[in-house]
Amino acid sequence: MNKTILDLWVGLFVVAGIVALLFLALKVGSMSTVNATDSYEVVARFENIGGLKPRAPVKSAGVVVGRVADIRFDNKDYQAAVTLRLDKRYAFPKDTSAAIMTSGLLGEQYVALEPGGDGTMLKDHDRITITQDAVVLENLIGQFLYGKAQEGAPK
Amino acid sequence: MLRQAIENLGHRTIQGVWRIGFAARFFLATLLHSGTAFRRFGLTVREIYFTGVLSLIIIVVSGLFVGMVLGLQGYETLQRYGSESALGTLVALSLVRELGPVLAGLLFASRAGSAITAEIGLMKATEQLSAMEMMAVDPIARVVAPRFWAGVISMPLLAALFSALGIFGGYLVGVQLIGVDEGTFWSQMQSSVDFDQDILNGVIKSVVFAVAVTTIALFEGYDAPPTAEGVSGATTRTVVTSSLVVLALDFVLTAFMFRGLN
């Protein structure tokens, strides 16, 4: 085969491959994951995190403002220590509360931040003190059944 | 009878170990002679044409159809749970993490790998490799290294094309044919596919598969008995061994890469 035609085909192939990679990077994957450089970390402790996983979104007013960076079990107070990596563009007051929510009935779990009214803002490695645990469906059903049984018991 | 069987087993084991040793030496020699593949890049470009460009058609068509089937099957299953909005995530994650690199690797082994083995086996059978040695041309530098690097360059590009076309196929069936909301399809996909964790790991997988498949194909060709039967046997062995190696490596790599995620 003529060398120039061969080069042309190989060139087209390489360009198509690179376009496919760019398509995967820009259209399919999220390049907007919060980077370590322009983010700060805060820790929130929960009694029960339910099915929360690392990389789950952290939302405030429904907007993704960060991701769950790390989940550890604190051996001193037997709680789950959840490290949240928040985007530097968003500042939250010191008395912000964190709650573990579920998107939809069967959706993924995320951390919702509810800003408070404090004048000072959260800094790197600060701790969110007001937290609300994940709602565990089994516990809820258990309480409901227990309540029903109590109602039916002879007085 | 029993003695014969034990002798055979011993002979085959020694042969197997010998081949592994020879393959390792062959792989090292290929890496050491890689300079030629880049100094005389024309040789490598020619091989990229034979391994990459000529494999395009099978990769493009398979990628599109695999994506379309994923869209159809995924929708069937997801709509039972009322979560057809997750179709984009399902199609993209299965393709980018697993099916793209693995199926492209298997197709690459059967299309390009077998061709490489047959070509080099035939070169050996017609004593072209010995002739090169006679002229003080190292066949590993002149024949093997350019093919090796051509495979390593082509395969990740083919895998990326496979994944991209698969996602397009899933989009065609899911959004255009069935009627899943287009915005949801893309936004769900973007929110759950991570560049580092999913796409980059898929590319790393395809590079590892490329090294494995190309090395096996080149080695089988180089080691083939110089007869018609020998070359045909080597070609079959290339497809069988490299397919099994791709699947086994996929398991090992997945265990390494995605262990920390859940």
Image (cartoon, rainbow, N blue to C red):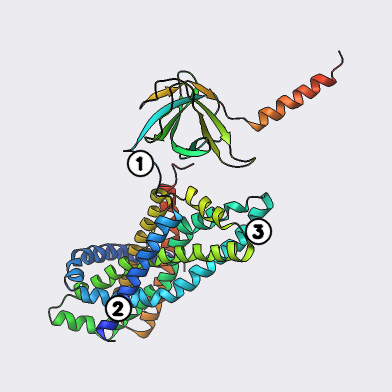
Name the mark nearer the viewer: 3 or 1: 1
Question: Which residue position is annotated with label 3?
Answer: B76
Compare residues B13 and B179 and report the one nearer the observer.
Answer: B179
Query: Looking at the image, which residue is at 84% across and 18% down?
Result: A153
When the figure is inspected, residue B158 is found, relative to residue A38, above or below; the finding is below
List x then y, in percent, for residue B193.
46, 51
Q: Position of residue B225 (x, y in %)?
A: 32, 79
Name the residue tied to disc 1. Answer: A35
Which quarter of the picture shows residue B213? bottom left
Amino acid tagged 1: Asn
Secondary structure of the residue carrying tag 2 is: helix
Q: Work out whether B187 lies above or below A3.
A: above
First-in-chain label (2 vs 1): 2
Q: Secondary structure at mark 3?
A: helix
Residue ID for mark 2: A8
At a point 34% along the width and 38% down the height, the residue shown is: A36
Which residue type does callout 3 highlight? Glu
Q: Residues within 10 Å of mark 3 (few under 14, many from 20)?
A: few
Is residue B224 something that shows in the picture?
A: no
